[in-house]
Image (cartoon, rainbow, N blue to C red):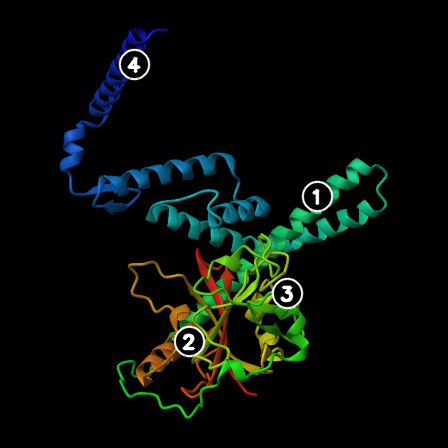
Amino acid sequence: MDKEENVQKKNTESEELYHISEDIARAIEEKTGRTEEDDSQRREYKAGGFTFKTYYEYKNAEDDIKRIEIIKKYIDLNDPEAAVRLYNMIRDGSIEFKSPIGEKYFEYVGDVVAKGSVDLLKDKKVVDEAEGAAKSGKILAIAVLVLAAVSFGYFAYSEIKDVVQTRKIEKLQAENKKAKTKDASDETPLKSDKVKQDVKKLEILPDYKEAHESNPEMVGWITIPGMDINYPVVKKNKDNNYYLTHAFDNSEDKNGSIFMDYRCDIVNPTTNTIIYGHNMTSGLMFGTLKNYLDQSFYENHRTINFNTIYEKREYEVEAVCLSEVAYQDDSNYRYYNFIQADTKGEWNEFYNDVVNRSVYGTDIDLKETDQVLTLSTCNKYTRDGRLFIVAKRVK
């Protein structure tokens, strides 16, 4: 085909597309009584009980309504496992909503999952019986299928327990917001009698020399007695993203590593030292921190050992808190940006946030002279949810 024929073909295709778009516009006009020009001049659009100021937002809402209709058609929310799977797909972004209508539907699915937990607890007996039958299975294929069903059933059971637990905690947290707050406008400088240390004069503890040699970005080691948390802690200079996807040996790993916020200092500690880790379903990294949402567990696991490569440190847990990542235009307080308090007001602002987000009451023993340790991980109680544990140094 020569150049002239190519040009002619493209012109023909463009003309066909133009006529198709004309047909669509005409059909919309006949059905709604509105032209495209009318839509561009409108200042408000309504869909699903919501009012939108822009056509773009309105289209997103319409798209969400279509997604919800498809979900209703193909997914039975009365099936607990199907409800959990849908909840996870929305939470993880496999199904993406872009409007308040979608967000409300996500909340509704969460409520369905929580309410369906009782039925799943009953179904778990059936699952357990199936697992027992599989042990004496006569046919390998049947055994594999039963085990697969058991695995998914157990996973769904665990997920629902998490949803139920965090929703209960969220309500408890809301009740705690009646606490008195401290003055966050106080510009009184915080005095410190700490003497700055010179890192060149410090020696790495014998326990950590070999590990530090294999990765010089290692800054310490964290353990929590009675929990499966026993990891080296690393820190990447001016980068809080690298160790989200890299292991201690710098290989790519979805589990990531336990890492310190690069703005913190182990030699001359900032007011708050923040350590991050993934909430892995397998329990790896900070996957077991959610156990702190059980009050009896919290009361019996108050000690955290975070040793730097230069000295041993012990902390006592003072608060278990739920939060969420604040978007750029949100005015919400960001606990993960509290590193150093130079004034009493800055300390009070952090303290007030901890009190308001605490799930076990407002009697929190923290003072501006304390060295604070914050462990932060993801949590499923809301989209972009976070669980953070606040502790103070006691040794």
Q: Who's the residue at 61% across and 77% down the image?
A: 301
* Residues at circles 4 and 1 in contact by the CB criterion of under 8 Å: no
**Numbered disc 2: secondary structure:** helix
Q: Earlier in the sequence, mark 4 or mark 1?
A: 4
Q: Please state which amino acid type lies under the numbered disc 3.
A: Ser
What residue is disc 2 on?
354
Q: Nearer the viewer, mark 4 or mark 3?
A: 3
Residue 143 position by quadrant: top right
Q: Nearer the viewer, mark 3 or mark 2?
A: 3
What residue is disc 4 on?
10
Residue 54 pos. (x, y %): 22, 43
Q: Please state which amino acid type lies under the numbered disc 2.
A: Val
Q: Earlier in the sequence, mark 3 or mark 2?
A: 3
Rounded to the nearest whole Å, what is the CA distance between mark 4 and mark 2? 63 Å
Front residue (pair 309, 188):
309
Q: Residue furthest front?
A: 200
Q: How many C-alpha atoms fall within 10 Å of the one at disc 2: few (<14), some, or many (≥20)?
A: many
What residue is disc 3 on?
214
Q: Earlier in the sequence, mark 4 or mark 2?
A: 4
Rounded to the nearest whole Å, what is the CA distance between mark 4 and mark 3? 61 Å
What residue is disc 1 on?
148
